Image (tube, grey):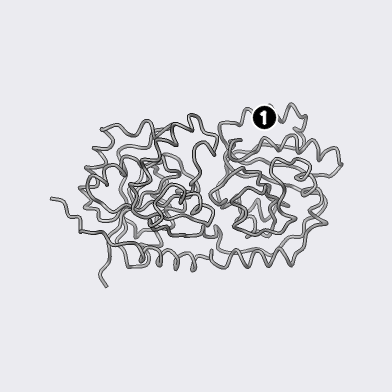
Amino acid sequence: MMRRNIHFYSDSTEWGGQEVLAARIASALADSNLWNVTFLYSCSQFNSALSPEVIRGHLPYAASTPFPILRDRIPVKKAKAKQILLEQKIQILVVCPGNIERCLPAIYAAKELGIHLVSYIPMCYTQVETGAKLGHLRDWMALSIYPLIDEWIVNSNTQEYLLRRFIAKETPVYQIPNPLAFETSQPAKVPNRKMHVATIGRIYFAQKGQDIIPPLAREIKKTGTPIQFSIIGKGPHQNKLERLIEHFQVSEQVDIRSWIPSEEIQHLLQEELTALFIPSHFESGPIVLFEALQCGIPAIIADADYVKDYQLPHWMVYKKNNLADAVDKLCHLPENWIEAEFNEMRNRLFSNRTDTAFRDIVATVFKSLTPPKRRFFPS
């Protein structure tokens, strides 16, 4: 069978969940022996994350931050992208933006060249919905980007619903659920009274909501329940978080740790933690939730819209922005814990997220992509 050619593109300078997942999709395609896969990237960490079967290409520029939607419209970047796309003789280009504002040089160049465009996008919230600066202006500008994409790939029902607010109803949208992070799953660990609870993610209150933890720790301290919080990550609000910890006088109950590699996160989840705490206001689909479940521990998670996709037990979900409910769910986790419910939930959620299932879904989705209307072989 003749292999098809496909190119992936990411101009992000950051390395996070979106980049990891884009690398896994590209690698799964390349390993299937059905595609010749090339990945064009700015972040050097793609080099080690991609399968040896993937052809690599380092971009000579990167997305501007902040406000790429305002800054990446310059002709110089588009001209560079156009030259690269011509040299690569691209037929199908899969752009991998963290949100609608990224990968713009390639999108504009590809449309001028008539290249079939697919976007693998996990975050379909608007800038206003995420509390971003100049959100209304950026969302207005983004409306011109959606029609440039021929087909879309998202990771959940919630993200497809959010995306379809801005695209034509006939535009194809496919789903590839986030795969499991680890190869094995540990037995469930029954939570005891003395608990160590962690929040893992970028320290950015508008999304991750870590600012609830200092007042939460103070209220839990009043109950006499021995809960230690660890906040793992870095971000723009770290100094604010440190000041909140001092203000609420919970420095003995809350510590901040920097980023740690994946293998250390797995060890921490398996050996040290009782539960994961996820106070996020919005997510594309938190990989860390599944990392915790694989390591046998539950998550206490705010009931943001994306959580509906998972149908979690009620004792794992608290009402967002409701401090009293969060206190109740954490303090009473040992009594509320039902191992049969926990195991049923894991079996259900894991069934379409194993590596084998992930590779099958990737193969099915990319086989379903609309073939380009014409072969693109520029002179």
Residue at image point 61% right, 42% down: 281
Tally of numbered discs: 1
Q: Nearer the viewer, residue 121 or 4?
A: 121
Q: Residue furthest bottom?
A: 1
Residue 283 x/y as whole percent:
56, 47
* x and y percentages locating residue 311 in the rendered image: 65, 59
Extreme residue toward the front, this view: 169
Residue 246 picture location, percent across and down? 73, 27
- Quarter of the image for residue 171 reads bottom left
Tell me the element at label 1: helix
Task: Out of 252 and 348, give the one closest to the viewer.
Answer: 348
Instruction: Give the vertical position of 269 relative to 204 (above or below).
Output: below
Q: Residue 51, relative to residue 163: is it above or below?
A: below
User: Dot 1, how many residues are within 10 Å of its Cα: few (below 14), some (14-19), or many (20+)?
Assistant: some
Q: Is residue 368 left or right of residue 19?
A: left
- Left-right relation of 200 to 87: right
- Taking the image as shown, residue 22 lies to the left or right of residue 37, namely right
The correct choice, above or below, for 211 with respect to 46 in the image is above
Name the residue located 46 percent from the left edge and 43 percent from the top edge: 15
Q: Position of residue 157 (x, y in %)?
A: 53, 57
Disc 1 residue type?
Glu
Dividing the image into 4 quarters, which one contains the N terminus?
bottom left
Place residue 339 in its image quadrant: bottom right
Return the residue found at the far left: 379
Q: Residue at coordinates 63% horizontally, 47% vertically from top-left?
A: 304
Residue position marked by numbered label 1 in the rendering: 242
Residue at figure coordinates x 68%, y 60% from the top left: 296
